[in-house]
Amino acid sequence: MIESRRSEAVEAYIQTLPDMCQTQVGQLRALILDTLPEARETFAYGMPAVTIADDEIVCRYKAQKHAVNLYMDAAVIANHANDLAALNDGKNCIRFSRYEQLPEETIREMLRETAVKQKKPK
């Protein structure tokens, strides 16, 4: 059940955001939790994070003044650079101002790839 994986601290963080940001972050949060049924929410580096197995971070996200940043594995982002070309992306983050800009299936694929990568023995 998704509700048991949600963090009250993350919920409180989202409630402090302006309405537009709450909507964007809420949609991203739902996409992440829907894609990774084994994931749990926490805070890491001062922002909401999603973890799997042994608390390995799959992604983090943070609302900024004009965008939401989704932080993920740099190699995974690089592998999907063509699909993310319309977005402002950096080495380890994807920025979007409207959820509708996100290529949902690409983000789902990236989340799954990162989760598999994080589960492998290091």
Image: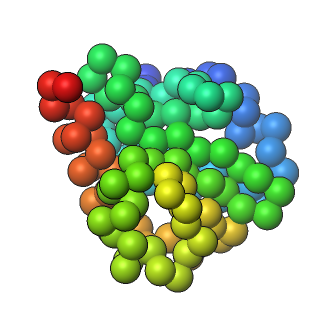
Viewer-nearest residue: 84 or 5 = 84
Q: From what the image shows, is residue 53 above or below residue 69?
A: above
Please indicate, yes or no, whether residue 10 appears anywhere in the rendered image.
no
Residue 106: x percent and y percent? 34, 68
* Color scheme of the displayed model: rainbow
Residue at 69% from the left image edge and 68% from the top image edge: 97
Q: In which quadrant of the rendered image does the C terminus lie? A: top left
Residue at 53% from the left image edge and 40% from the top image edge: 60
Q: From what the image shows, is residue 38 above or below residue 116?
A: above
Residue at 29% from the left image edge and 45% from the top image edge: 114
Residue 50: x percent and y percent? 45, 34
Q: 41 left or right of 76?
A: right
Q: 54 left or right of 19?
A: left
Location of residue 24 by image quarter: bottom right
Please indicate, yes or no, whether residue 113 appears anywhere in the rendered image.
yes
Residue 4: x percent and y percent? 43, 23
Q: 116 left or right of 79?
A: left
Q: In which quadrant of the rendered image does the N terminus lie? A: top left
Q: From what the image shows, is residue 93 above or below residue 86?
A: above
Location of residue 83 by image quarter: bottom left
Viewer-nearest residue: 110 or 91 = 91
Residue at 72% from the left image edge and 29% from the top image edge: 12
Q: From what the image shows, is residue 17 above or below residue 39?
A: below
Furthest-left residue in this view = 121
Q: 116 left or right of 7?
A: left
Location of residue 95 by image quarter: bottom right
Viewer-nearest residue: 17 or 97 = 97
Q: How many marks?
A: 0
